[in-house]
Amino acid sequence: MAAETELKKKIVKGLFWKILENGGAQGIQFVTAILLARLLSPAEYGLVGIVMIFITIANVIVQNGFSTALIQKKNSDETDFSSVFYFSLAIAAAMYGLLYAAAPAVGRFYDNAALTPILRALGLVLFPGSVISVQTAYVSRKMEFGGLFAATMTAVTVSGVVSIAMAYRGFGAWAMVGQQIVYYLALMAALFLTVSWKPRLLFSIRRIRALLAFGWKLLTAALIDTLFSNLYGLIMGKIYNEELLGAYNRGDQFPRLIVNNLGAAIQAVLLPAFSSKQENMAQVRDMVRQAIRISSFLVLPLLYGLLAVADTMVLVLLGEKWLVCVPYLRILCVAYSFWPVHITNLQAINALGRSDVFLKLEVIKKTVSLLGLAVGVHFGPVVMVSIKAGIDFCCVFINAWPNRRLLGYGIRSQWGDLLPSMLLSVAMCAAVWWIGLALPCGALVRLVLQVLAGIAVYVGGAALFRMAGFRYLTGVIREWMNRRRTAGAGKE
């Protein structure tokens, strides 16, 4: 019982630091993105967006698979971590060589020679990225999220200042290149100072093979997912133009920021927690259920609130030239609203060591998605992205299907836990949208009033109906305040 209580405390503490890290980092990146959007054009954003697709795919090969395997393995030691460190650097060198050689061909394919030097410069992030993947795996394993918070905040602040200064001085798209390179280098350096793990002169090819036995399936699944996720950008950049791609990426940024903040925080903390209890299915099932309730309660109102205020927010923060991104922003808010269920189900499958099931799910989902993309591309970008949102909804059922057998927690039970937050979020969205149409005031005042109304409707409704997520979070807050009060009384 004491061990279970200690695990719950670690999960709450880990979530606190991870949400604080993601929230602080995303907040700084959000401000940086707003300032850059006012200094750069949609076409410049689209230019770097094309290059980032190739960097993201290469990063998956360098980083994915091993990091999850290190967390999932019951007794990962110094030899495991150091072996992965050196092996990942070798993979990064191979991938950079490939990108460097392919850069001119990419420039010719998109009929833009400026892509060649940008791709070669951005490819350098693969080296610090390979190191960071091992460092963050150690952080997740040991739940040392305080050090990761400090390192991430340092990196986003330094890289943000550098990119804004470069954009102000007229470097154009290169300001975003500088942001990425400085971020990766600063994060790697800060993690060496704040995290207790350091690489040692240890290497075992036998350990690498053992980790690969689990990790290659996750790597393949992540590669399939990344290739397909970026296929929309590749198509928009080729068939349409850089400006449209920039608008799509900007519309994607805001809902992704919400999901990456809360969703990734939950993902990073729950995988080691699930893994530690992988032999007790009842406990894993209870944790999965609680994770879906809490993440849905937090993520859904933010996404549906963003959907309601999208046009006003873009006008206030980015300016009129970016209103072209509003349709994509609203569609993607709906698409991302299913991510809490996606993430939690997939993390449970990973924690149970079923990477084979994980890979099969990715193949099924991407086959369905590819068919949807083939249809959507004939009807224009807005229809194409709308079909993507519909397919994401279908993927909720695909991801949940194995856990009916593995955990006894199927899609019907999951929707029972998800639906209260979904219904209240949709009702709040409708109220906020109506307020936006009814108010004759200026954009800034209208945005503030819409946000305040959304908070009042959602929090009031959650309290009125005593929703499970609301009761759990208020209970955690009360417990934290009581501990603080008791600690203060003890000092006196």
Image (cartoon, grey):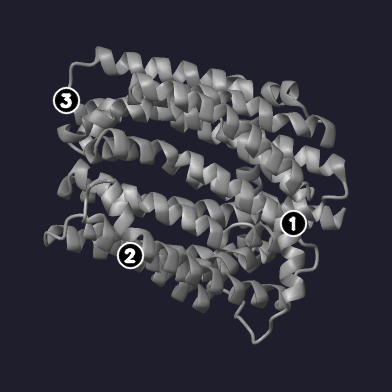
Is residue 105 rendered to the left or right of residue 113? right
Q: Residue 430's mark? A: none
Name the kind of residue labelled 2 in the image.
Arg
Instruction: Say which label, 2 or 3, has the lower sequence index.
Output: 2
Residue matched to label 3: 442
Q: Residue at x 41, y 56 (%)?
A: 55
Looking at the image, residue 317 sits to the left or right of residue 137; the answer is left
Mark toward the viewer: 1 or 2:
2
Q: How far apart are the alpha carbons under marks 1 and 2? A: 32 Å
> Residue at the spot x=45%, y=32% of the render?
302
Residue tagged 1: 214
Residues tagged 2 and 3 counted as in contact (Cβ below 8 A): no
Q: In the rendered image of this protein, does residue 424 appear above or below residue 297?
A: above
In this view, the residue farthest toward the bottom is 201
Q: Amino acid at mark 3?
A: Gly
Residue 392 drawn at (x, y percent): 54, 28
Mark closer to the chain start, 1 or 2? 2
